[in-house]
Structures are given as C-alpha cells and as structure tokens.
Image (cartoon, helix red, strand yellow):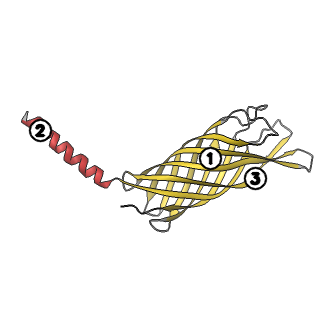
Amino acid sequence: MKKVAIATLLCFLGLTQVNAQVSFKPGLRAGLNLSHFTQTDDSDEDFKSKSDFYIGGFGELKLTKYYTLQPEITYSRQGSKYEYRGSSNSTTFDATYLSFAVVNKFTFNDKFNFHVGPTIDFLVEKDRRIDYNSDVDLAFLLGLGYNFNSNFGIEARVKKGIVPVLDYNDSQTNVVFSFGATYTFDIK
C-alpha cells in the first residue's frame, strides 16, 4: 500500500509539472484566399483562380516548446472562375464554407512554424447556377508561418479538398491558397 501511495504521489507531481508547461491562448486569423477547382485534361472547361477572403478564430494549445495543437473555426469564401475553352467569356462561381480544422503547428526558434492538418468544411452559401456534389468537403492543409512577436504573425497555406465539388464531374475538387495575418491574445 505504501508503494502505491508513493507511486501515486510521484505520478501526481509529474502531471503537475507537465501541466505547468501547457498553455492556452485564443486568437484571430484573417486574410486573402486564392481558390479554384482542379482541372481535368479531357474537359473543355478551364477553371482559374478567384480571390476572396477568410476570417476566423483559433485556440492555441501549446503542449511543448516545439508543438502546438491549434483547433480553428474559419469563415472562408472560395470558388472558381470558369471559362469554356476557346471562349473569352468567363463566369465566377462562389462558395462559402464554415471550416473546422485541427492544425498541428511545429515551431522552430520561436519565429518560424510549420502547419499540417485535416479540415472539414461545411458549405453554408453556394452559387445557384451550378449543382454542388456535396455540402461537406474534407481537406488537408499545409502551411508556413512567421511570428514577429508573441502576438502578431503571418501565415501562408494551401488547402486541398478530396470531395468532388461539382455534381456533374467527379474530378473537380477545391484548392485554396491562403495568405494572412494572425493575432494571439495574451491571457494569463
């Protein structure tokens, strides 16, 4: 019984020390989206990038000096410009998503960071001129960031969807390049 009590005490002290290193800070992120649908070689359709914006919030759960788990909720305006090959007329298709991401952020020398993680995006507003295949998109993101100080930083990411976007073609998926700024709040 004495050994169990000592082991429990040591375990509790170890957990207390680990918890002392963990911190949580909320933040905001916003910036520019350059999005398009992927191309197909056998189609007469030409999808080009359109620009729009994103805005969202995150919770930065710093687990170690180099690793942070960062859940995010982002309002993202996306879509694509469309041209029929051989025609000079273009149309813009708009789609707005509410995106939930779980970002694994790896920090190097307290300034540079690398982002990777999955997202699930829910279509909240869509262009009525086209039929969307699904109201949900699963995607993966990859990105880089730079922190100027403990509050302000910049980021660049690419997000690639895996669920077909258009109802009539199973090969077009979302691709989004994002460039923006982040602000992390100091909460003690």
Q: Quadrant of residue 52?
A: bottom right
Q: Position of residue 120 (x, y in %)?
A: 58, 39
Mark linked to residue 5: 2
- The amino acid pointed to by label 2 is Ala
Q: Earlier in the sequence, mark 1 or mark 2?
A: 2
Q: Residues within 10 Å of mark 1 (few under 14, many from 20)?
A: many
- In the visual, does 148 lie left or right of 44? left
- The quarter of the picture where the N terminus appears is top left
Label 1 is placed on what type of residue? Lys
Q: Residue furthest right?
A: 87
Q: Are marks 3 and 2 in contact (CB under 8 Å)?
A: no
Q: Which residue is mark 3?
A: 50
Which residue position holds label 1?
159
Front of the two marks 1 and 3 = 3
* 89 to 4, vertically: above or below: below
Crowd around label 2: few <14 · some 14–19 · many ≥20 (10 Å): few
Seen at 15% across and 39% down, the residue is 7
Q: Which mark is residue 181?
A: none
- Which callout, 3 or 2, points at the residue further toward the start of the chain? 2
Q: Alpha-carbon distance for marks 3 and 2? A: 63 Å
Judge by depth and name the residue closer to the eye, 141 or 136: 136
